[in-house]
Amino acid sequence: MEKSVDKLYNVKKIRLERAKQGKNIRELADLAKLDPKTVSRIEKQKVIPRPQTIGKIAAALGKNYEDFFCQVR
């Protein structure tokens, strides 16, 4: 079974929430204690992030981890 970023997490929500809060990638990365390249790759759907990484990003944005899961239909 093939995994893809868009099937696990809604990374568009990460980008939208970051922009809504007026943060750039570097600011979000600093708050989440991640490398800015990692955040950029996640937003561009180049990598499948680990759950811990999504948790760090969610916390840095003041959101719940579950807010970035894709909804199952």
Image (cartoon, helix red, strand yellow):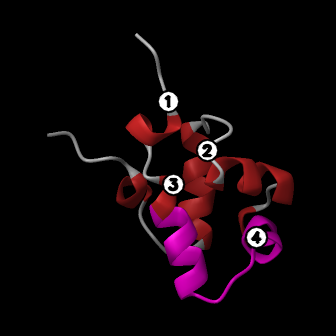
**Amino acid type, mark 3:** Val
The residue closer to the viewer here, 55 or 20, is 20
Q: Is residue 8 above or below residue 2?
A: below
Range covered by the magenta-colored residues: 13-30
Task: Report the side of 60 relative to 51 (left or right).
Answer: right
Q: Do the residues labelled 3 and 4 touch (CB within 8 Å)?
A: no
Look at 57% across and 68% down and name the residue there: 15
What's the mark number on residue 45? 2
Look at 78% across and 77% down and name the residue there: 27
Name the mark nearer the viewer: 2 or 4: 2
**Amino acid type, mark 1:** Ser
Image coordinates for residue 65, horizontal then vertical, percent: 44, 56
Which residue appears farthest toward the top when viewing the image? 1
Q: What element carries label 3?
A: helix
Residue behind mark 4:
25
Residue behind mark 1:
4
What's the mark number on residue 11? 3
Q: Do the residues labelled 1 and 2 touch (CB within 8 Å)?
A: yes
**Amino acid type, mark 2:** Gln
Crowdedness near tag 4: few (<14), some (14–19) or many (≥20) residues, C-alpha within 10 Å: some
Q: Is mark 4 on a helix, strand or loop?
A: helix
Task: Report the side of 3 relative to 38 (left or right).
Answer: left
Q: How far separated are the C-alphas under marks 3 and 4?
A: 13 Å
